[in-house]
Image (tube, rainbow, N blue to C red):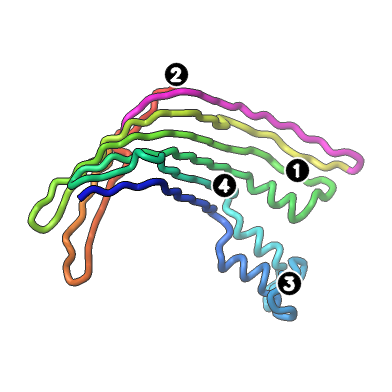
Amino acid sequence: PFSFNITSNNFLIRNNFLTLGLYNQFFTGDPDHPNQPLDLETKVPGKNYTYKSLLKGYIPTHGLVFDLGTNISLPGLNFSWGNYAVTSGLQVFWESNFPKPLFKLLLDLNPVGSSYKMSFQQNILMVQHLAFSFAIPFPAYKVGMTIKYLAGLGYAGVDSSGGYFYTGEKYIQSDSYYQIRRAVGGDGIALDFGFTSDRMDKWQFGAAVNNVAGKIYWG
């Protein structure tokens, strides 16, 4: 059988700090005012610290990591027939790492004598891929392989960064540096391997290893 995909789009957003449970606890969990944020300056019942201190304790030591990603299929270049398929798409990845002291600055502001170390990391990658896939059927399962050509459209990343933010009695002092690397135009290949079983009492099992030996050589 032959199938044809006109277009599709996948979108990913994630972080390593804010969860639904954490959001409900601090931003809708006021016991005296339902669905209202907690007063961060009040003490936790039965404890000798405030909700603000509790919130700061949830912030990961290496800071907040925020990821965005999308995969947009290219119209007309996604189809399959029998055990073969051709797929293509545009992939964009964005990863940012904000330092923990930045959130302490937002929560505590900048009291006199406070000093905050600042560093920042970020990576942005745009890749277009064209892939050919095939599957080999066996009596109770199938194994498959995908060969992908990767066209690197662009990359930008912060290799190293640092600095500080200090508040004195009558002045504010700060210093920072950022080293950025970028590249445009690259070529590479990658391999995917997969396995899927036939249906067994409404159950079907599968596994895949993606981007084996995947690498892009930038011009």
Apparent side of residue 59 relative to residue 168 in the rendered image (left or right): left
Task: Work out how far the residue at label 1 is from the one at label 4, CA to CA, in angstroms.
Answer: 17 Å
Query: Which quarter shows the C terminus?
Result: top left
Q: Is residue 188 magenta?
A: yes
Q: Position of residue 35 (x, y in %)?
A: 69, 75
Q: Residue at 62% across / 44% down in the picture? A: 98
Using the image, tell me which numbered label, if any, was put on residue 43.
Answer: 3
Vertical arrangement, residue 199 with respect to residue 75, above or below: below
The residue at which mark 1 appears reads as: 115
The tag earlier along the polypeptide, 4 or 3, is 3
The residue at which mark 2 appears reads as: 219
Vertical arrangement, residue 75 with respect to residue 26, above or below: above
Q: Position of residue 124 (x, y in %)?
A: 53, 36
Q: Position of residue 115 (x, y in %)?
A: 75, 43
The tag earlier along the polypeptide, 1 or 3, is 3
When asked about the image quadrant of residue 132, the answer is top left
